[in-house]
Structures are given as structure tokens and as C-alpha cells.
Image (cartoon, rainbow, N blue to C red):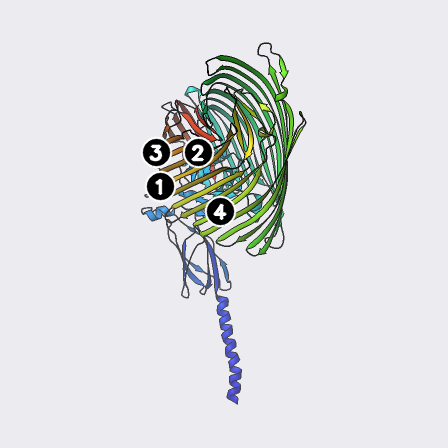
Amino acid sequence: MMFIGRRKILYPLVCLLFYFCFTAEAQHNKKITGKIQDTLGVALPGSLIKLNSALDTLATAADIDGNFSFSQVKDSIVNISVNFMGFQPFKKTYHLSKGIQQIQLKPIQLIESSNLLNEVVVVAVNPVILKEDTVEYDARAYPVREGDAVDAVIKKLPGVEVDKNGNITAQGDPITKIRLNGKDYFGDDVATAIQNLPADIIKNLQIIDDYGDQANVTGLKTGTPQKVLNINLQPDKEKGYFTKTTAGAGTEDRYVGSIKANFLNGDQQIAANGSLNNIQGGSAGISSHKSIKLNYRDKWNDKLVSYGSYRFNHNTNQTLESVASQNIYQDFTRFEDQQNNNNNKNYSHRLSWNFEYRPNELNYLKIEPDLSFEKNNSLNTGFTTTQLQQTSSERISSQDQYRDAFNFGTRVFYNHKFNKSGRNLSLHAVLNSSSGGQDQEVKNDYENIDSLGNRSYENQYQLGENQNSNFRNSLRASYIEPVTEKSFIEVNYEWSRTLTGNDRRTLDVNPVSGEEVLNQNLSNLYDYQFTTNRAGISYRVKHEKLNYILGFAAQPSVLNGTDKSRNINTHKETFNFIPTARVVYKFSKEQNFSANYQGSAQQPGFVQLQPITDNSNLQNTITGNPNLKPEFVHQMKLEYKKSNIKRGRTMFANIGYNCVEDKIVSAKTIIPDSLRQETTYMNTDGFYNARAVYSFSFPLLKKLFMTYYGGSNLSNNIAFTNNERHVGKNLSVRQGVKFRIDIEDIVDTEVNASYTHNKTSYGNTNLVNRNTNQLNIGIEGRNYFFKDLVLGYDFSQTINQGFGTGISNPTLLSFYLEHRFLKENRGSLRLQGFDLLNQNTGVSRDVFDNEIIDRQSNRLTTYFLLSFNFRLQQFGGS
């Protein structure tokens, strides 16, 4: 009995002892978290981390943000080692506090390895990180010369192209905006933004599919995104300044002067850019340019951030161009050859601003006012020859035009987050008002020859006055309700209205007496309004690998037009069901796929609607059609992205397809026994456009990289000629390859070769196909000598085939020789020679409706320029 009693007592005591021992052991287990990054603070995903102690043997890898964690760590003295290709191994012993279970280590910073002898290590410093809608490039993987601007880095990014004017294309789509640390930088002036920042303060660059403010706040992404480039600074370089001044003069009266300045102090950013030059040779004609551009950003208090930009531009341009047009009819082709001299002067001011207000964590308000003014004066003269079978005409023309425009608009976005996670209410309002005027003087002298050889003459002299106004407002409301932790429902409604008015007055002037007579047929007072109501619902599911949105909307539209001069009213109603869909599948951290569909209604243009005839060219008159219906556009896009950080490979590919219901197309008619072509507009179906773009980049050798790229575009164009439906298909295919060699302080060069084939065919005519081919070969780069001397060069050869007579095959060769001097290479002297062979011209082909247009224009030709550059820079105490 005593034994039994003792057992009854000892048994619970033993259990209790085991419980306390187990609990004590569990309480002593620790969770250790940390982050792996380089000395610049850039995360190093994929780093291998090992933890060893007398009681532990654990291993893990850093995630895409460089974070790692170990749970159930038993010992208080642990050894942690980190390995990542291209960096020196890290080892350290940590003494952990016994009474703390959650331990956050200071970020572990790895030092770059100086041994880059094997291919594996070299490739490792070429990281491209893929996220759902973002491609992130590590700036260190694309080294540039000291003093270079960030545009030098962008030119090296796989899948990204920068043209001579500073326009950026990423994965086949244009970059519409630049951001600095997530905020707009110089508005939509992409070229200025990328030339105003020094490259050596950049941490990374992100190509982002931006779906707008609501998506950025709520994460619900619908609609058609814009490509945005976000530039993130290194954390220790967010305080400092940078200035660069350039002045130069050369032969052929060429000159250049500029000053660029940036001041950064954390949340405060001030940037200025002033320039004047006449050496911009990347576009048609000979141009001179003057500009002042300012950018500002500051956090006024804990709740309010303000940022924006102002810019003034004054541009002049003279373009000499040859234009060859072919209007394809069922049984014949109408040819038109023009020699034009276009002189243009343009002044513009624009102020764009943003106010972001966060009174608390639940509410967000953004107000974006935008104000602009522009005036333009142009004088265009030309000589045109028109041929149609056995008849011809010659026209000497002159058109003097003055135009001004004023625009003011405001966008307001408000979002409220409820206490329940994922529940949001968003309001988005747009108010925009614009007005403008246009005065023009048109003179035409015609000499016509009929099929029998008879000649006739005709003179035309017109004065025109045009005043227009446009008022647009819209309001959109959206409510998002979480269904589960991973799924949401959005209900939305949008109302939009556009009011447009135009007052046109045309005077016929007697060429001999100068008498002015009002032309009633070409004068009118016309107003129209386009109103839409759109209600929709969508369902979103968000998982680690798969995200998708499915929804639909109903949209009735009303188009009303009033010709007050003739008391004519038009009224059109349409109704559309609009499905929406978006799918993103993440195969891995380095590979994802997305698919998007979006539908939208587009109103006709004012010129297309206005029921009067523009006969400023008697051989080609244009009359609007007030009975046009709005177009409805179906847009679909598939996109695939893949990167391999270890091997340095990246791949981007996308396919887009647009189909338009009630497409507004031209309807052209040849007046019998004449050369005169009358054009109006009508709605039809059958138009579509398909596009594919791809880019594949990988290293061949230690410092040699290759990019294979290409794309194609297929358009099914519809037009009506002489009251018959006309179908023309245009196929353009481009293939190219680039080789880039980049050896620090020795050479930085890219060799590029591309071939473009353009084919236009007409299935229901007896006309032969129109084909053109274009081969481009070029090399652009820099060689470095003695650390202070740079030789830059740009060579290209273009071979054109099938464009017709008079189209040249230009060979372009430019160079510069630059010597750096003064302390920290602050000064440089550059001798530049442009187009040494004097062959710079521009050649292009456009195909639409039943028309093919080939253009050749003059561009800036041979000159030499000597310039001096002075740079001052200090960031983060450097």
C-alpha cells in the first residue's frame, strides 16, 4: 500500500518534471532572422547561409529580398557563414542573449571578390530579378565610366533600347515616365531625366508595368498598364549634390551649352536643367533647341509630400523632305510625289505637380494639377506631282499657320482602407479644360494635264480662322471586399463626358483683287459630346504562384453632334459588354508568365466628325462624317519573362493582339475624268493588329555578352475605295543581334546588326505586293587610353531596298576624342566630329488604309565641335 501510494505521488511528479524540462528546452530555442546584402545595401537573393554550433547544424538560402531565418536554434554561441558567387565568404561567431527568443541580426554585408577569373563568378554579377510586374536590374552589373549619366547604364540593359533622342523602349513598349525613388522625376520628359543623374549613385533600375494609383495602393491591377522606369538610389547616396556644365562651339555655326544640377537631401530633391544647342541630329531636319527644366520634391511634414516639374521649350526646325505616296485602288494606283520645305517654330510651357496627403494609415489623397501653354508658327512650301493613269497635275503650294493652345487639368484620387484587411473604397476624378486657336493662309497654284494632253490652270487662295474648346470630366468609384484571405471582389462604376466645340471661318481671297468672301460651305459652328457610363464587377484571387482577375462590365455610350450653322443634329447610342481578365503565373523567382485582356470604347476625332470639307488641297479634299459611331477596341497581351542569375541569362517575349469593332476608316473616291480624290470616313469591321517582340541575352565569354532580339507586326487594314471594300495586309519582320564587350578602363563597345522586311499585299486586286528590305549594321562604343583619354565612335551602314528611286543607302561615321583632367577628373575637353562622310538622311515607310507613304528627309550633316565639361559631385561624404 505504501508502494502504491508512493507511485501515485511519484508518477505525477515525474510527468511534471518532464513537462518543465521540455518547456524550458522549448523556451531556450531561439529564432534568428537577418538579411544578406552587399556593401551598397543591395539584397543578394540566393545566398547560402549555414549555422553551426555544439547543438545545431542548419542551412538555408536568402529569399528574393535577401532575408533569411533559422528557427529552433538551441545553442547561445553560433557560427554563421555566408557564401555567394562573386563575393568573399563571410564567417562570424555570434554570442546570443539567453533570455531572448526572437533575435534580429544586423544586415550581413558581403564584399565583392576581386578574383573574377572564372565564368561562374563573372556571370553572378549580372543579376536581373523578376517580380510580378517588375524587372529589376542591379546597376553594378552594368558598369560605366566615372562621370557618366544614368542613360549610359540604361543602354546596356537587356531588352531595353535607347534611341538618339533619349526615348526608351522596354520589351517593345515605350517608357512613358521616369521616377526617382518611386516619385515622378521631370514628369514625362524621359530624355532629360536619364541625362540628369550620375550613374555611380544608382542602386538599381526597375522597369514597371504601372496600372495607376489604385493598383499601387490596393494591389488590384486592371486595365492597360504603362511602362515606367523607376531609378532607386544607393542608401548612402541620398544626400549630396551633382552639377555638370558644358560649353562648346564648332564648324557650320554649331554650338552647345548646358548646365545640369541635382541637390539631394533625403526626402528633399531639387534638380535643374538648362540647355541650348543646334546639334540634335537624331530626328528629321535641322533643329535648334532651348530649354529650362526644373524638378522639385520634398516631404513638407509627416503627412504631406509635394513634388512636380516645370519646363520651358523653344524649338525651331527646318525639314526638307521627299514624300512618295501610293493610293491603291482595285484597278489602278494613284501616285503622288512631293518635295517639301517645312519651317517650324514652337514655344511651350508646362507645370505638372503632385500632392500626396496621408492623414493616417487608412486614408490617402493625391491631387495632380497640370497646366500648359503652347504656341506654334509654321511656314510650309512644296511642289507636288500627282499621276493617275494618263492624267497628271503639278501643284506649287504655300501654307502659313499660327496655332496656340491652353490646357488645365486636375486629377484627384482618394482611397480609404477599412479596418478589415483588404477592404478599400477608391474615388478617382478627372477635370480637364483646353482651348486653342488656329489661323492659316493657304495658296495653291495648279497645272493640270488631262488624258488628251490638254492643259488647264487653277489658283486657290484661302484664309482660315479656327477656335476650339474641349472640356472633359469623369468620376470613378471602386469598392473592394475581401472574400477570403486570398480572394477579393471589386465593384466599380465610372461616368465620363467630353464636350467639344469648334468655330471655323474660311475666306476665299481673289488672287488678283484681294477681295475676301466668306465660304459658307467651309465655315460652321459645330459642337459634340461623348458620354459613357460603365458599371463592372471583378473577382481576384492571389496565391504565391498564381494571381488572376476575372470580370465584366456594361457600358452604354451616347454621341451627340450639333451643326449650329446648318441646324443639323446627330445622335448615336451604343452598348457594349466588356469582359476583363488578367492572369499571372510565377513558375519560380526567375520565371513568370502573364496574360491580359481589356476592352474600351474610343470616340471619333473632331476632324472625322465635323460635317464640312477641307479643300486646302484641291486634289485631295477631306469631309467629316457626323454619323460615325465610336470604335470598340479589344486588347490582348501575353508576356513571358525569365532570368537566370547564376548564368547571367535573361529572356523577354510578348505577343499582343488588337481587334477593333466599328473601326473608323477612310472612304476614298476618285472623281471621274480627274485626279481629284475625295476622302471621308465610315465605320467597318475586320481591322486587327498582331505584334510579337522578344529579346534573349546571355554571356558568351567572361566580358562578352550577346543579345538576340526581334519582332513582327501584322496589320489587316480596311479601307473603301470607289465604294468598294479594300483589304490590305502589312507584315513587318525584324531580326537583330547585338554583341557587347565591356572591359573596365579598356573598352566598352556594342556591335549591332538588324534586318527588317516589310511586305504589303492586297488580296482583292490585281496589284503586285509592295516589299521593302532594310539592313542596318553598326558599332558604337568607347576605348580608354592612359585612364585620361577616351576615344568614342559611332558607325552605321544602312542598305535600303524596294523604296523606289532616289532613296539613298547612308553610311554614317562619327567620333569624339576626350581628355579628362583636373582633380578627380572634374574637367574634360572633347573634340567631336559628326557624320564625317556627309551622308546623314532619314528613310521611313508608313502603311495604313489603302495608302503607302515613303519618306526621305534631311538631317544634321558634317560638323566638328570642341567643348569643355566641368563636373562637381559629392554624395554620402565621398
The residue where tag 1 is placed is 705
Q: Are marks 1 and 3 in contact (CB under 8 Å)?
A: no
> Given the image, on which type of amino acid does mark 3 rest?
Asn
Quarter holding the C terminus is top left
Q: Earlier in the sequence, mark 1 or mark 3?
A: 1
Which amino acid, by three-letter code, is at mark 2?
Gly
Element on which disc 1 rests: strand
Q: Residues within 10 Å of mark 3 (few under 14, many from 20)?
A: some
Label 3, secondary structure: give it.
strand
Q: Which mark is residue 763?
A: 2
Report the disc number at residue 595.
Answer: 4
Q: Position of residue 79 (x, y in %)?
A: 41, 60
Cα–Cα gap, marks 1 and 3: 17 Å
Q: In terms of sequence position, does the residue under pointer 4 or pointer 3 come before the other?
A: 4
From the viewer's side, name the closer residue of 307 and 286. Answer: 286
CA distance for labels 1 and 2: 43 Å
